[in-house]
Image (cartoon, rainbow, N blue to C red):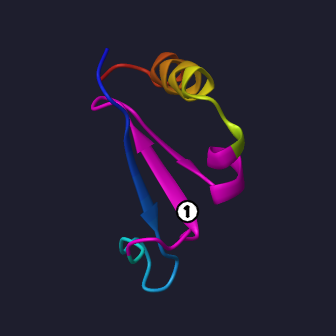
Amino acid sequence: MTELEVTRLLQNPLGQPAPEGERGDIVRVSDGTRTLYLTPREYEEATEQQLRYRLAAEGRARPSA
């Protein structure tokens, strides 16, 4: 199982990584193939299993090109 990549981002300037130790405004979670954008609260309340489920569901929701 691949490790999840978690990046906390700022809204201003948009999409820039938050400074180390900052909560950020948006949290990007990726498994290397799919990506979710969550609020910091959504991320903090979710378990790794829930995050992986949401990533898998995101992959099924998108039509393949």
**Residue 3 falls left or right of residue 46:** left
Q: Quadrant of residue 31?
A: top left
22 falls in the magenta region: yes
Q: Secondary structure at mark 1?
A: strand
Q: Residue at x 49, y 18 (%)?
A: 56
- Return the residue at label 1: 26
Residue 59 spot, x, y in % from top left = 45, 22
**Residue reaching furthest to the bottom:** 13
Q: Measured along the vertical axis of the image, is residue 5 above or below residue 17? A: above
Residue 49 spot, x, y in % from top left = 57, 20
Q: Residue at x 52, y 56 (%)?
A: 27
Hey, what amino acid is under mark 1? Ile
Which segment did they paint magenta?
20-44
Q: Quadrant of the N terminus?
A: top left
**Residue reaching furthest to the front:** 21
Residue 65 spot, x, y in % from top left = 29, 23
**Residue 19 falls left or right of residue 57:** left
Q: Residue at x 51, y 23 (%)?
A: 52
Residue 60 spot, x, y in % from top left = 50, 16
Query: Callout 1: 10 Å neighbours few (<14), some, many (20+)?
Result: many
**Residue 47 falls left or right of residue 61:** right
* Front-most of residues 29 and 23: 23
